[in-house]
Image (cartoon, helix red, strand yellow):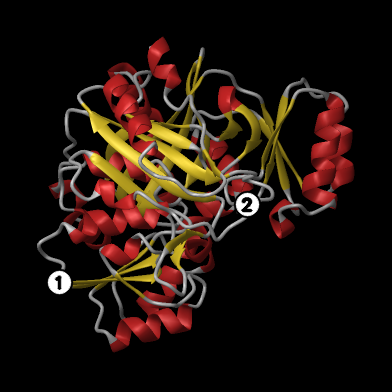
């Protein structure tokens, strides 16, 4: 079969790498792709929001399955566009992708159906939000309602910080229209865990757990980023927690969406906080997480194409997900200055060392070819260096050893990804 993957980051590279292993795939395309994806797929210069061009390309090449990976095109109706053209596409329709596209919607859904989450209030005006903050307990969390590349969440320790946060989100519009409405949320404490799942509208299959590091600097300092590294599985995600979440969070979310007439088919990412009062939902994403995908898919035994099709066809109950009894750690190599100001265009060296290294992977997030055919940096997050091991400590040591194989100008990384493993 012919498969098209929409997207061009580390998540899409991991998906393309996994899809390329399927004996069912005879030809793989990616739009727009990147220099790393080009090793396993033919890259096509079409943007993720150019739905008409994507559909036309899929028709021209007789694509059998399109996988829409990023949040923006999902929320804007990419899957709807493909289905309207009579084409098969993996991912939620726009009316289901709102689970991520509007934090106010997802919070209201959880309240209505009794799914555990933090207490919250929603505001459409800065004036009302500021008045509420005057008597609200600190610390507190401010969230832009719409999509903000994983960065529209502000943790405010004082009233002054919270007021400045309202200014940033609602008045200065740092994240554009995503901040027209904000959610003001109770600050929760505990371990964060990421759990990805496949959903076919009624059945949910849980993937292995992971844990992300969002802050730019060591010790969870600095600004929020799209993710500086991750590990899988999380030693804090126990069998007891898994059983609780399956009964009170995972299946109830799928059932709630169906009850609302928003049948969800695709991937639901559950961002969980393991609080003293039990697991609660921090956020939903309506797609694979990045960089979580880069540690989860290398551990998955299943043919991912079979799983994608089962989600579309409503036959996921016939599939049991299987994962290797090992661990994986991903360290993001970024451009120094990310997520604010950074330079691009530096030649990347050492990538060839991964080709014959079993259990070591490099997933490209921000790379491209220059006019001379060199692979150069083209983003804030450049590469995700992933390694597996018999256990988390071994995988972590392997991943950090592999980061030394790669060099480029202004290379930056955190040195404590997975350090929490030592505390488990």
When the figure is inspected, residue 383 is found, relative to residue 72, above or below; the finding is: above
Quadrant position of the N terminus in the picture: bottom left
Q: Is residue 40 above or below residue 42?
A: above
Circle 2 SS class: loop
The front one of 391 and 415 is 415
Examine the rendered structure and indicate whether residue 336 appears above or below residue 348: above
Q: Is residue 413 above or below residue 22?
A: above
| Element assignment for label 1 | loop
- Marker disc for residue 26: 1
Residue 411: give x, y in percent of width and height.
Answer: 52, 43
Q: Is residue 311 visible?
A: no
Nearer to us in this view, 122 or 232: 232
Graded by Cα atoms within 10 Å as few (under 14), some (14 to 19) or many (20 or more), the crowding at tag 1 reads few
Task: Identify the disc placed on residue 279.
Answer: none
Left or right: 205 as drawn, with respect to 331? left
Image-based side of 83 in relation to 108, left or right: left
The residue beneath circle 2 is: 148
Residue 3: quarter of image: bottom left
- Report the residue that reaches farthest toward the left: 23
Residue sitting at x 36%, y 20%: 241
Q: Position of residue 68 (x, y in %)?
A: 39, 64
* Mark 1 touches mark 2? (CB < 8 Å): no
Q: Nearer the viewer, residue 79 or 330?
A: 330
Label 1 to label 2: alpha-carbon separation: 36 Å
Is residue 5 in sight in this rendering? Answer: yes
Counting residues from the start of the chain, the first of labels 1 and 2 encountered is 1
Q: Residue at the spot x=33%, y=25% of the render?
A: 397
For image coordinates 76% across by 21% down, the residue present is 138
Mark 2, Cα crowd under 10 Å, few <14 / some 14-19 / many 20+, is: many
Q: Residue at x 72, y 59 (%)?
A: 177
């Amino acid at each position: 079969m012919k498969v098209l993957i929409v997207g061009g980051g580390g998540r899409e590279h991991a998906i393309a790498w996994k899809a390329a292993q399927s004996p069912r795939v005879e030809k793989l395309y990616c739009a727009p792709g990147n220099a790393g994806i080009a090793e396993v797929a033919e890259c096509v210069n079409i943007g993720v929001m150019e739905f008409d061009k994507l559909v036309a390309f899929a028709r021209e090449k007789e694509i059998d399955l399109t996988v829409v990976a990023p949040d923006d095109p999902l929320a804007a109706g990419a899957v709807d566009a493909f289905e309207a053209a009579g084409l098969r596409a993996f991912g939620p329709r726009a009316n289901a992708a709102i689970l991520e596209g509007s934090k106010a919607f997802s919070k209201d859904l959880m309240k209505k159906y009794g799914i555990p989450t933090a207490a919250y209030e929603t505001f459409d005006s800065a004036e009302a939000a500021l008045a509420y903050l005057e008597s609200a307990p600190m610390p507190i969390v401010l969230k832009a309602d719409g999509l903000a590349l994983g960065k529209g969440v502000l943790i405010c320790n004082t009233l002054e910080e919270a007021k400045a946060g309202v200014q940033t989100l609602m008045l200065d519009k740092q994240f554009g229209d995503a901040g027209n409405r904000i959610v003001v949320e109770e600050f929760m404490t505990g371990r964060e865990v990421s759990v990805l799942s496949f959903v076919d509208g009624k059945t949910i299959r849980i993937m292995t757990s992971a844990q992300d590091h969002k802050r730019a600097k060591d010790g969870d300092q600095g600004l929020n980023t799209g993710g500086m590294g991750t590990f899988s599985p999380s030693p804090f995600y126990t069998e007891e927690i898994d059983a609780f979440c399956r009964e009170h969070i995972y299946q109830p979310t799928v059932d709630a969406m169906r009850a609302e007439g928003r049948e969800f088919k695709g991937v639901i990412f559950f961002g969980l906080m393991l609080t003293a009062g039990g697991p609660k939902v921090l956020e939903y994403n309506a797609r694979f997480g990045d960089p979580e995908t880069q540690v989860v898919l290398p551990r998955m035994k299943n043919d991912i194409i079979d799983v994608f099709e089962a989600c579309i066809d409503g036959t996921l109950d016939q599939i049991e997900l299987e994962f290797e009894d090992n661990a994986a750690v991903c360290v993001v190599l970024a451009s120094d200055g990310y997520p604010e100001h950074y330079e691009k265009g530096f030649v990347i060296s050492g990538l060839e060392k991964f080709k014959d290294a079993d259990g070591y992977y490099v997933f490209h997030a921000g790379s491209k070819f220059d006019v001379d055919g060199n692979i150069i940096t083209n983003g804030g997050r450049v590469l995700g260096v992933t390694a597996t091991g018999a256990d988390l400590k071994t995988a972590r040591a392997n991943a950090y050893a592999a980061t030394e194989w790669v060099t480029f100008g202004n290379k930056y990384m955190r040195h404590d990804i997975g350090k929490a493993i030592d505390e488990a």
